[in-house]
Each structure stands twice: as C-alpha cells, then as structure tokens.
Image: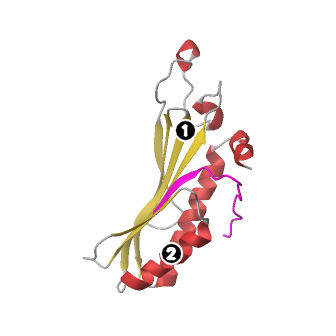
Amino acid sequence: MALSPHNFPKSPVEEVVCSFSPGKTGKPVEIRFPSPYPGWQAIRVRIRDVISSVAKDEIHSCCLTYTDAIPLFSGEHPEDLLPVIPRVPGVYAGRLCSGPEISFSVESVIPDTILEVWCRREEEQVILICTVSGETGVNSRDSLLQWFDRAREEIHLMFDALVTGKVLDRFS
C-alpha cells in the first residue's frame, strides 16, 4: 500500500527510531532521527545504507517507533485531540498535572508483529508513541526495507485513526 505523506509544514514528529538485529548473535543496530523530521524517504535511505554495511545474515527482529508531540492550546484537554484518551470529569480536568495515560497493542498486518500505542500528557502537550515490532526472519536488504515501509504505513494509518481533525488541521 502506498500512502501519501501528510506533508505538514511543521511536523509533530519528535523522533523516529529504527532498530534491527542482524543474525542470531549480531549486535542490535539502532538509528535515531530527532526533530526536525527529515521525511520517510531520507529515513529509508539511511536504513538502506546501514543495512548494507552491517547486515550480512538474516535479520531476526525489527522495530520502528514514531514519537509525536501535539501541543495543547489554552482550554484544550488531551481527549479533545485524541478521543481514545479517557475524559477526566468536571473540575478535576482543569487541575491535571499529568495523565491521563493510555496504552494498547494490536496485531499488525505484518506477520509475527505487533503495533503498540502509548498516549500521555506531558506539560502542555500530548505525547503519542506508536511502535511496530516483531520477528522478521528476512534475509535481504530489499525485504527488510519492505518491512520498514509496511511498519511506517501501519503507524501512519494508526496516527490518522487516533487523532481528531483538529490535530490534522493544526499541522497542515
């Protein structure tokens, strides 16, 4: 599935982390992309280059994590931006120091893989973390790149399913 990018002028992405373990005894490899978000194509090129230099055997596990920071404006509550977050009742909502938090995991469309989601309030923003991880058993650079492409698509779809139109408008 080919997803069109959001093309936000200002991306909510705070960090992207890609990791994989080459071979049964290979040292795990982690690649971090801090804000500003360079775009998926730049990340994909870096993953490809790293795979070429370190992955000589089968890759046994992979992980892709996107961390987004969504600012809360005056009078907004986390559940206004991400309806999956439970609403804190009445007067207590205005006195929140942190939370509410929610986490859940679902089976991925990628075999032997799960998608985990964490949402929490931190100061005047909502942090949304989406992670796709699993056992891959791939043995080529192209297969591994395809795994990361599919993981990114799944995170993209989950982001769109979780946030309100208000969030999408905010970054457009």
Magenta region, residue range: 1-17
The residue identified by callout 1 is 126
User: CB under 8 Å between callouts 1 and 2?
Assistant: no
The extreme left residue here reads 25
Label at residue 13: none
Vertical order, 161 against 21 (above or below): above
The residue identified by callout 2 is 46
Of residue 157 and residue 129, the one placed in the foreground of this image is 129
Q: Is residue 106 left or right of residue 84?
A: left
Provide residue 56's location: percent of width, then percent of height: 36, 86
Q: Is residue 77 magenta?
A: no
Vertical order, 91 against 17 (above or below): above
Alpha-carbon span between mark 1 and mark 2: 28 Å
Provide residue 120's location: percent of width, then percent of height: 49, 37
* SS at circle 2: helix
Which residue corresponds to the image point at 40% horizontal and 84% vertical from the top-left?
53
Provide residue 88's location: percent of width, then percent of height: 54, 22
N-terminal label among 1 and 2 = 2
